Image: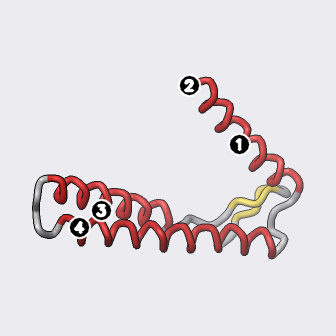
Amino acid sequence: MTTSHGDYYIPEPSKWPLITMLGVFSTLLGTALWINHFAAGPYIMLLGGLLLAYIFHGWFSDVIGENLSGRYNAQVDRSFRMGMIWFIASEVFSF
């Protein structure tokens, strides 16, 4: 389900943020358990790391697929670039 607001592309809701949260939580929980010498810690951390690798592959392939299918116009491209510029600027000013 793709929503169209004029010429601006708005993607359908994504499952990736929820899976990312689970991957980060698993990695951090596994690390904390491993540091505290729980036997399952390394395995939970490994599971979280594998989940994060899966997320990077899936999310980036979705975005690349949307771009190659021509769903992004010049306004969306400009929004992506400005978002990245603002993110980098906020990081620079934070440090």
Q: For the residue labelled by badge 1, is the local secondary structure a helix, a strand or a loop? A: helix
- Tell me, what colour scheme is on the image? secondary structure
Query: What amino acid type should be assigned to the residue bearing mark 2?
Result: Phe
Residue neighbourhood size for the residue with mark 4, other residues' Cα within 10 Å, grouped as few (<14), some (14–19), many (≥20):
some
Q: Which one is closest to the eye, mark 3 or mark 1?
A: 3
**Residue depicted at 44% across the width and 61% down the height:** 20
Which of marks 1 and 2 precedes in the sequence? Answer: 1
Q: Residue 66 placed where, x, y %?
A: 74, 71
- Mark 2 sits on what residue? 95
Rounded to the nearest angstrom, the CA distance separating label 2 from label 3 is 29 Å
- Mark 1 sits on what residue? 83
Rounded to the nearest angstrom, the CA distance separating label 2 from label 4 is 33 Å
In which quadrant is the N terminus drawn? bottom right
**Residue depicted at 64% across the width and 38% down the height:** 87
Q: For the residue labelled by badge 3, is the local secondary structure a helix, a strand or a loop? A: helix
Which of marks 4 and 2 precedes in the sequence? Answer: 4
Query: What amino acid type should be assigned to the residue bearing mark 3?
Result: Ser
- Mark 3 sits on what residue? 26
